[in-house]
Image (cartoon, rainbow, N blue to C red):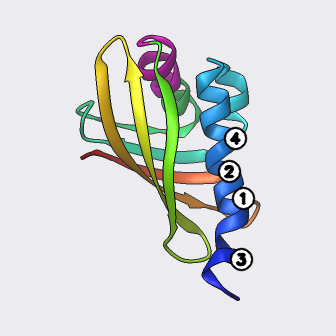
Amino acid sequence: MSEAAELLPLEATVKALIAATNAFDVQAGLALFTATAVIDDPSTGHTFRGRAGVQDYLERYFVGYHTVTHLLSVTALGRTRIRARVDFTGDFGHEIGLLDLAVDTHGRISRIDAALE
């Protein structure tokens, strides 16, 4: 299978997450994650675990800061991993970030490792 073919379902997941967070729709965002998902975001100083942690992350850093995200590029990191380079704007200003997403066999996000450039 080509890298482009591997990218399509994962890219759709990234785009769905961005659409949910840009709409400040926490429930739509949560639906994209596994129950045991982990978000490791050193820029916040925290690691968020499980549905409660993901909900806290989405509410605090997307809804709370009025964050709007634009997808700049995606790179396949294998069949179940993708790196999204994104542009964030919000009450905090402007940042470019990387989101390394891993998905389970059902296409739900099991882990995000976030970093700022």
What is the crowding at mark 2: few (fewer than 14 residues within 10 Å), some, or many (at least 20)? Answer: many
Mark 2 vs 1: CB contact within 8 A: yes
| Residue named by callout 4 | 16
Mark 3 or mark 1, earlier in chain: 3
Mark 3 vs 1: CB contact within 8 A: no
At 65% from the left and 75% from the top, the residue drawn is: 4
Mark 3 or mark 4, earlier in chain: 3
Question: What's the magenta region?
Answer: 56-65
Mark 4 or mark 1, earlier in chain: 4
- Residue type at mark 2 is Thr
Q: In this rendering, which labeled residue sits more in front, label 3 or label 1?
A: 3
Whole-percent x, y for residue 115 in the image: 30, 46
Residue 93 falls inside the magenta stretch: no
Q: In this rendering, which labeled residue sits more in front, label 3 or label 2?
A: 3
Alpha carbon separation for disc pair 2 and 4: 5 Å
* The disc label shown at residue 13, or none: 2
In the shown orientation, is residue 31 left or right of residue 50? right
Residue 33 in view, yes or no = no
* The disc label shown at residue 5, or none: 3
| Residue named by callout 1 | 107
| Image quadrant where residue 30 sits | top right
Mark 3, secondary structure of its residue: helix
